[in-house]
């Protein structure tokens, strides 16, 4: 793997702020226990998965259970991706600056256990990492910066020229869609040039999902949900919740949204939502659909890992072996 040096724009933030997630609230400071918060998740085609912790650790899951593993550094893991052959993770140099020698890092692993590290000349919190259908990798940042690669090895920092914080990222087969703290859902065909649409929501939006056939759902603060049939025009829906929603995924012929105080919301069409009993008050940060295992996986604070099987309306908690 070749190492390239690129410059970002975001100055360091307090560790506590990063640990709770960029869209979190100060109330979440009292929630954490063993971990600072699982806040990134990726699943491979065989149902193996890796979650990243704000304290710099990983949790590795397979048919034998879930186990903790200390990462190469103590820097918070903010984004994860399985690209078909390997896991890619980004961590965040929260306690430093470029002048002080701190750097974000790209971590690569085929099994989630042993990680190869490439230091990047950035100190931006990259919130999401995705890949398009043609091989382009894209990470979006909370200060509007982008990391772009066409092979997953050599990365270039790009200024998006967007005065906004990117929070969620989706590739729908023809373009990237990114949610933002401004309540916008921005679009880009190449990950470099982004439009400036009117806000889709009056609250910050934190994630966006697509059902693969035309329905888009974006979720955000205070239970805000908007839907679209084309990814351009959005309509607000009633979620029945006032809790912050941090992520949403499609699978099992339904959307699943997750958020603050253990919030789980499900919907077949994005319009009518039903609350599920998560069995926890932990802040739920990420959700992914595991097609091989026919289940949703959810991770969050308090070392929380939940599994919601296809057709089920209540998840079960998965235990983690070892402290994070």
Image (cartoon, grey):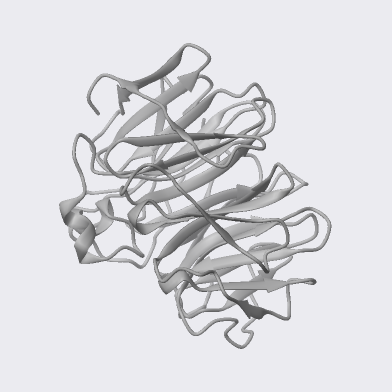
Q: Is 95 displayed left or right of 159 in the figure?
A: left
- Viewer can see residue 100: no
Compared with residue 53, is residue 170 higher up or lower down, i.e. above or below?
Answer: below
Query: In x, y percent, where is residue 285?
Result: 41, 50
Residue 151, x across and y down, in percent: 64, 40
* Depicted 243 relative to depicted 238: above or below: above
Does the rendering let one see residue 280?
yes
Residue 32: give x, y in percent of width and height: 21, 45
Q: Given the current orientation, which residue lies at the most extreme right position? A: 213
In the displayed structure, 236 sits above or below 101; it is below
Where residue 93 appears, x then y in whole percent?
27, 50
Write the residue at 33% across / 55% down: 261
Q: Residue furthest bottom?
A: 198
Q: Front-most of 156 and 94?
A: 94
Q: Residue at x 57, y 32 (%)?
A: 43
Q: Is residue 225 left or right of residue 92?
A: right
- Closer-to-camera residue (2/278): 278
Q: Residue drawn at (30%, 45%), measured in percent from left and top?
A: 301
Which one is in front, 132 or 270? 270
């Amino acid at each position: 793997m070749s190492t390239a040096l690129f410059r970002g724009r975001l100055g360091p933030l307090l560790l506590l702020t990063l640990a709770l997630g960029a869209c979190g609230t100060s109330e979440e400071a009292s929630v954490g226990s063993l971990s600072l918060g699982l806040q990134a998740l990726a699943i491979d085609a065989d149902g193996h998965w890796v979650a990243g912790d704000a304290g710099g650790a990983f949790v590795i899951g397979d048919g034998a259970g879930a186990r903790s593993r200390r990462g190469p550094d103590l820097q918070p893991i903010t984004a994860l991706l399985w690209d078909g052959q390997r896991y890619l993770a980004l961590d965040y140099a929260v306690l430093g600056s470029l002048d002080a020698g701190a750097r974000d890092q790209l971590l690569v692993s085929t099994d989630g256990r042993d990680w190869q590290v490439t230091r990047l000349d950035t100190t931006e919190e990259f919130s999401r990492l995705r890949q398009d259908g043609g091989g382009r990798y894209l990470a979006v940042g909370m200060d509007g910066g982008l990391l772009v690669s066409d092979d997953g090895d050599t990365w270039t920092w790009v200024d998006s020229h967007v005065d906004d914080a990117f929070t969620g990222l989706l590739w729908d087969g023809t373009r990237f869609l990114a949610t933002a703290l401004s309540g916008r859902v921005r679009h880009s065909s190449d990950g470099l040039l982004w439009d400036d649409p009117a806000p889709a929501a009056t609250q910050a939006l934190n994630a966006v999902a697509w059902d693969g056939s035309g329905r888009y759902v974006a979720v955000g603060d205070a239970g805000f949900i908007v839907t679209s049939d084309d990814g351009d025009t959005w309509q607000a829906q009633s979620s029945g919740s006032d809790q912050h929603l941090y992520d949403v995924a499609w699978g099992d012929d339904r959307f699943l949204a997750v958020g603050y105080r253990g919030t789980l919301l499900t919907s077949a069409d994005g319009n009518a939502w039903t609350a599920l009993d998560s069995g926890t008050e932990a802040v739920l940060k990420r959700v992914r659909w595991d097609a091989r295992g026919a289940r949703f996986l959810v991770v969050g604070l308090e070392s929380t890992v939940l599994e919601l099987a296809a057709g089920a309306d209540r998840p079960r908690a998965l235990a983690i072996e070892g402290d994070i």
